[in-house]
Amino acid sequence: MRGKVSLMAAPTGLSPGGYVSQAYADRSAPRTPLAELEAEKDGVLWRVRLSWACADPVRALGDEVDRFVDAAAVLAPIVPDAPWMTMGAPGKAVEGAMWRADRERPFGVRAEGLGSLERSVAPKGWEARAEWKSGRWQVEFELPGWKALDAGRQLAIAVWQGAEADRGGLKSVSAGWIRVGT
């Protein structure tokens, strides 16, 4: 599977706690409106490549508490009817990998609904390589043995642009699950 994916701003009204939905109510346009996605399977290895425009890359935070790094994530549903927009639901988890520009290794991520995201050490062999060149991030995930993607052949993506104050639920996301593989 190879193509362009239109992204939307993650709805701030879905953020738990009320603060984000009030403070960022006007954040309805995605900071990253388009990403290129390529996903292929080679034996037990899933290779997922993301690319998006980023004029001002943020690779590190330094000592600045009001600064945010660039990041990207790929998710797959553990069960076929897991909702994407709410990052799963109780008993209907999603899982995946998250790359951050300030880390060499990706995180493993899992969630069962909004506000439930758990980051962990990525499974053995999972890697992410990134390069910023000519105004674009290019991130390649290598994810051997990803059973959720093997089973459902569906992905969703999220992109954070640190220079645009993207972080947590403030991100650009695919509008739904994207069918990959055959």
Image (cartoon, rainbow, N blue to C red):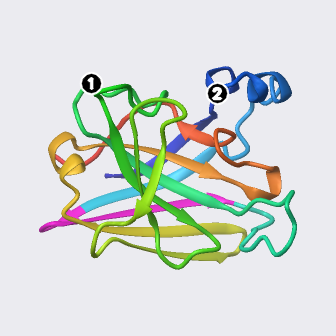
Q: Does residue 44 belong to the magenta stretch?
A: yes
Vertical position of residue 137 compared to residue 147: above or below: below
Give whichever of discs 1 and 2 has the lower sequence position.
2
Answer left or right for 170 relative to 39: right
Answer left or right for 28 relative to 91: right
Q: Main secondary structure of the magenta part?
A: strand
Q: Residue at x 23, y 57 (%)?
A: 146
Spatial CA distance of label 1 from label 2 is 21 Å
Q: Are marks 1 and 2 in contact (CB under 8 Å)?
A: no
Label 2, residues with CA under 10 Å away: few <14, some 14-19, many ≥20: some
Q: Does residue 175 belong to the magenta stretch?
A: no
Vertical position of residue 42 compared to residue 38: above or below: below
Answer left or right for 91 relative to 114: left
Vertical position of residue 143 compared to residue 177: above or below: below
* Number of the front mark, 1 or 2: 2
Label 1, residues with CA under 10 Å away: few <14, some 14-19, many ≥20: few
Under mark 2, the amino acid is Ser
Q: Residue at x 49, y 54 (%)?
A: 73
* Span of residues in magenta: 41-53
Q: Position of residue 158 (x, y in %)?
A: 54, 46
Vertical position of residue 8 compared to residue 75: above or below: above
Under mark 1, the amino acid is Asp
Q: Is residue 173 visible?
A: yes
Residue 16: image quadrant is top right
Q: Residue at x 48, y 37 (%)?
A: 116
Q: Position of residue 72 (x, y in %)?
A: 55, 57
Question: Element under label 2?
Answer: loop
Where residue 81 is drawn, which disc sits there? 1
Residue 125: image quadrant is bottom left
Q: Is residue 28 visible?
A: no
Residue that numbered label 2 is attached to: 15
Question: Element under label 1?
Answer: loop
